[in-house]
Image: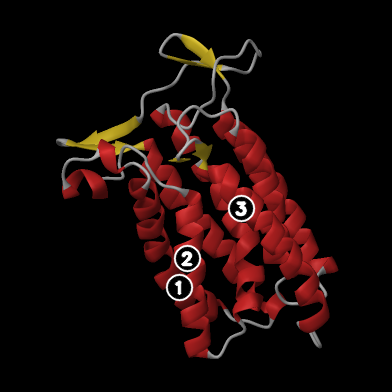
């Protein structure tokens, strides 16, 4: 498979890139699904919108900030740092900033933040699954050379389509977490904890294939952070099961 044109169409001198279209579509779809499922968590669509209207833009800022922080040598001007049209969003930064924003907004609205996180996180996984295809159009976030038949051609070399691996895994996560939320969740915070564990397991192994990883010294920061998240979320899952039971639906 050969990388396609990253530009979907142009309006005058402005190129509209597939990366931006996919990110925007992923956000809209995830919000619509969360609004529809809000009643399962004793929340309303307005509750979801009140949180996401703050969480999404701040999450994007966080994703870009996180990426730039580990690539400071690549940027010479502030304009380059804030230009995301060519890619450069780190999901871990988006999650950190997004969850922090969610917590603050939920506290102000007197909503249980863990309940809101459990509602939103399956749709976040779906948004990741969709958004990863933006990496395909940009020719980024790929792995090293491979002879596998599903490899993609980048600079005349067949490489691992790591965006595809993560997209498939996140799609599976969406269905699994949605089912868990509806049928198996017994305590607030369990779904977000499971997401942290399962996504981090996948990210640890996929990151080992990537050639553009953000680094902390000689270590890949995504792998290091994945291990920390797995440990913390495992503890969180069992803590929530004991201390955050759902008393009514």
SS class, disc 3:
helix
Q: Quadrant of residue 217?
A: top left
Q: Is residue 68 above or below residue 110?
A: above
Q: Is residue 124 above or below residue 113?
A: above
Task: Give the residue number, with chain letter if any, for mark 1.
Answer: 101
Task: Give the residue number, with chain letter if any, for mark 2.
Answer: 98
Relative image position of residue 150 (x, y in whole percent): 63, 18
Q: Quadrant of residue 187?
A: bottom right
The reply to whether discs 2 and 1 touch (Cβ–Cβ < 8 Å) is yes
Q: Quadrant of residue 236?
A: bottom right
Mark earlier in primary sequence (3, 1): 1
Mark pair 3, 2: CA separation: 14 Å
Nearer-the-camera pick, 118 or 196 = 196
**Disc ID at residue 133:** none
Task: Give the residue number, with chain letter if any, for mark 3.
Answer: 125
Q: What is the basis of the colouring in this image?
A: secondary structure
> How many C-alpha atoms fall within 10 Å of the one at disc 1: few (<14), some, or many (≥20)?
some
SS class, disc 2:
helix
Relative image position of residue 52 (x, y in whole percent): 47, 70
Mark pair 2, 1: CA separation: 5 Å
The quadrant of the rendering that contains the C terminus is bottom right
For the image shown, how many numbered marks are present on the structure? Answer: 3
Relative image position of residue 172 (x, y in whole percent): 72, 45
* Residue 245 appears in the figure: no
Q: Residue at x 34, y 41 (%)?
A: 71
> How many C-alpha atoms fall within 10 Å of the one at disc 2: few (<14), some, or many (≥20)?
many
Relative image position of residue 247 (x, y in whole percent): 81, 88
> How many C-alpha atoms fall within 10 Å of the one at disc 3: few (<14), some, or many (≥20)?
many
Q: Nearest to the eye among marks 3 and 2: give it.
A: 2
Q: Is residue 51 above or below residue 87?
A: below
């Amino acid at each position: 498979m050969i990388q396609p044109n990253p530009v979907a169409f142009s309006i005058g001198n402005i190129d509209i890139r597939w990366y931006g279209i996919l990110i925007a579509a992923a956000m809209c779809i995830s919000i619509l699904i969360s609004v529809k499922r809000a009643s399962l968590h004793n929340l309303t669509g307005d509750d979801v919108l009140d949180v996401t209207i703050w969480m999404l833009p701040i999450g994007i800022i966080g994703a870009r900030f996180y990426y730039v922080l580990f690539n400071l040598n690549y940027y010479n001007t502030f304009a380059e740092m804030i230009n995301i049209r060519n890619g450069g969003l780190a999901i871990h930064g988006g999650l950190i900033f997004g969850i922090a924003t969610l917590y603050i907004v939920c506290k102000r609205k007197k909503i249980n933040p863990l309940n809101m996180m459990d509602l939103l996180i399956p749709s976040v996984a779906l948004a990741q699954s969709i958004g990863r295809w933006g990496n395909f159009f940009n020719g980024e976030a790929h792995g090293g050379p491979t002879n596998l038949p599903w490899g993609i051609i980048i600079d005349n070399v067949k490489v691992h389509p790591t965006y595809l691996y993560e997209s498939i895994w996140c799609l599976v996560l969406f269905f699994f977490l949605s089912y868990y939320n509806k049928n198996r969740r017994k305590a607030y915070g369990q779904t977000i904890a499971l997401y942290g564990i399962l996504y981090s397991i996948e990210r640890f192994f996929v990151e080992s294939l990537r050639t553009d990883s953000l680094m902390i010294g000689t270590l890949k920061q995504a792998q290091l952070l994945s291990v920390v998240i797995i440990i913390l979320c495992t503890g969180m899952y069992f803590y929530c099961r004991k201390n955050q039971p759902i008393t009514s639906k």
